Amino acid sequence: QVQLVQSGAEVKKPGASVKVSCKASGYIFTDYYVHWVRQAPGQGLEWMGWINPKSGGTYSVQKFQGRVTMTRDTSISTAYMELSRLRSDDTAVYYCVGDYFDSGSYYNGLGYWGQGTLVTVSS
Amino acid sequence: EIVLTQSPGTLSLSPGERATLSCRASQSVSSSYLGWYQQKPGQAPRLLIYAASSRATGIPDRFSGSGSGTDFTLTISRLEPEDSAVYYCQQYGISPFGGGTKVEIK
């Protein structure tokens, strides 16, 4: 079955960087985009952007441009999201999400969610 | 940037009742990209509806989506206690999520 397994919780100081990993299994990693979504405590969902695992091409929303780096290692079917210059308001659960597909067909939706990684930014 | 506005903020209904959730876009959105998600406390979100009206695998048929242009609706025809959750809409790969609608079961 499709699974996205993320790295464990992190505690960082303001100004530091964090890198979250997301290992995919159960499908061909390079066939579908991986998105990153975060959720601050008690808040709604915030979509950050995506990476195309086949080409390495990325898109990030303007708010995160210059601070977020999305990469992948196709040899181990793993996507990464690095966020730099951390602030206290970056404290959130970060999710990686795979495109939705069914019976070999791709659909426009965030279908397969990782378990989430809590990143706490505190001095 | 397209902004999605969801209403109401909270919906409190009894089991068996019908829930109607609205997602309004600041400009026209392709139906092919409009999705609905359910999130229960302490859990990751789950895709319910893609392309405005298609149910994802395993989603009960009491959930249905409709709409086009700037107005989209998620309907839960007969509420079950396990439908208590926050529901979000999003234009896939393009826009932020809406602010969410919390559905409470009385």
Image (cartoon, coloured by chain):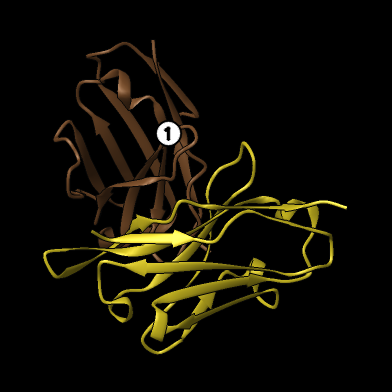
Chain colours: A yellow, B brown
Q: Secondary structure at mark 1?
A: loop
Most foreground residue, A11 or A44? A11
Most foreground residue, B89 or A120? A120
Instruction: Please report the residue visible at 49 percent of the width from the left and 35 percent of the height from the top.
Output: B42
In the rendered structure, the answer to whether residue B50 lies left or right of residue A23 reads left
Q: Residues within 10 Å of mark 1 (few under 14, many from 20)?
A: some
Which amino acid type corresponds to the residue marked 1 in the rendered image?
A: Lys
Residue A114: x percent and y percent? Answer: 43, 56
Residue A20 in the image: above or below residue A11: below
Residue A50: x percent and y percent? Answer: 47, 72
Residue farthest along the bottom direction in this orientation? A55
Residue A48 in the image: above or below residue B78: below
In the rendered structure, the answer to whether residue A70 lies left or right of residue B17 reads right
Query: Which residue is labeled 1 in the image?
Result: B40
Name the quarter where the C terminus of chain B is drawn: top left
Instruction: Please report the residue visible at 39 percent of the width from the left and 43 percent of the height from the top.
Output: B23
Most foreground residue, A77 or B40? A77
Residue A22: x percent and y percent? Answer: 47, 67
